[in-house]
Image (tube, helix red, strand yellow):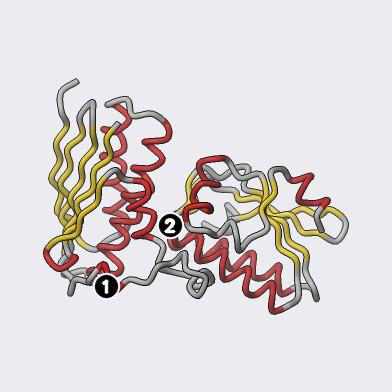
């Protein structure tokens, strides 16, 4: 099947985020990723997009989130960029540490890194690249 | 919207309140808040509440949903209550294992096993 490529620039808006997510997941399903991969990609996209809008852009409607994606028969690759202040991955506490287990937030990055094959942060944490290979 | 479609369905088994989720996805912040408010109301309605959350309908949840469950767990503990989770499909169960929240919550395979554990 022909590779699917996407480029979206959206405002910090959850409804637009859902539209983007829906189009990307349709492509993933069309390229016949199995149920486990679809679950993984959907969850990672959810966490990544929420992070960009909520923690990156602080829900500022003037700030945008850029999403680039490529879905092939072998892989699904996403780059999500926000316009926030950035962050250092090393500064994010380990949510599985016993001292953090009952904190109600801070698990999104763990889930992204657990469910995708490779994950990288660049541009001081504003740009997330993640890939899931079949 | 919430008046037409309550976020949870509640039934009883003796003194145990059983909660089922009416949406198969626990993702949207607004939806998570609605669910959290509904469950917290159940926590508050009795002394030493007993609550069973049945995940049989749920096929997706996010880290925000986990945060809501942790908050409910804290409130249950504050009231010396008993909280059980049950009927979680394997993909969702893995989310609890990855985050190590399977150590925090009492999780049972089936609703019957959970009911028997109170």
Could you tell me residue A79's position as x and y percent? 17, 50
From this view, report whether residue B44 is shown above or below residue A45.
Answer: below
Instruction: Report the residue at 36% width, 44% height from top.
Output: A42
Could you tell me residue B104's position as x and y percent? 61, 63
Disc 1 on helix, strand or loop? loop
Which residue has dot 2 on it? B28
Q: Quadrant of the C terminus of chain A?
A: top left
Q: In the rendered structure, the residue with mark 2 lies on which chain?
A: B
Q: Are marks 1 and 2 on the same chain?
A: no
Whether residue B82 sits left or right of residue B61 in the image: it is right
Give the CA separation, mark 1 to mark 2.
Answer: 17 Å
Q: Residue furthest right?
A: B14
Which residue has dot 1 on it? A58
Instruction: Report the residue at 71% width, 67% height from top.
Output: B42
Figure quadrant of residue A58: bottom left
Disc 2 on helix, strand or loop? loop
Figure quadrant of residue B39: bottom right
Instruction: Report the residue at 44% width, 67% height from top.
Output: A95
Callout 1 touching callout 2 (CB < 8 Å): no
Q: Which sits in the foreground, B68 or A122? A: A122
């Amino acid at each position: 099947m022909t590779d699917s490529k996407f480029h979206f620039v959206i405002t910090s808006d959850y409804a637009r985020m859902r539209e983007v997510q829906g189009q990307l997941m349709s492509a993933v399903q069309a390229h016949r990723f199995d149920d486990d991969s679809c679950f993984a990609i959907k969850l990672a996209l959810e966490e990544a997009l929420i992070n960009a809008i909520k923690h990156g852009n602080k829900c500022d409607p003037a700030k945008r989130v850029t999403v680039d994606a490529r879905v092939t028969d072998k892989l699904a690759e996403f780059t999500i960029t926000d316009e926030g202040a950035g962050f250092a991955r090393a500064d994010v506490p380990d949510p599985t540490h016993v001292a953090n287990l009952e904190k109600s937030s801070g698990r999104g990055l763990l889930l992204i890194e657990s469910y995708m094959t490779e994950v990288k942060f660049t541009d001081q944490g504003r740009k997330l690249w993640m890939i899931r290979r079949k | 919207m919430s008046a037409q479609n309550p976020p949870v369905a509640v039934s009883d088994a003796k003194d145990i309140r059983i909660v089922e989720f009416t949406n198969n996805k626990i993702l949207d912040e607004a939806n998570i808040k609605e669910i959290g408010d509904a469950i917290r109301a159940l926590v508050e309605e009795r002394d030493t509440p007993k609550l069973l959350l049945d995940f049989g309908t749920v096929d997706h949840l996010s880290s925000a949903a986990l945060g809501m469950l942790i908050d409910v767990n804290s409130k249950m503990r504050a009231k010396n209550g008993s909280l059980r989770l049950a009927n979680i499909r394997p993909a969702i169960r893995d989310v609890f294992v990855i985050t190590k929240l399977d150590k925090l919550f009492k999780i049972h395979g089936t609703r019957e096993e959970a009911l028997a554990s109170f």
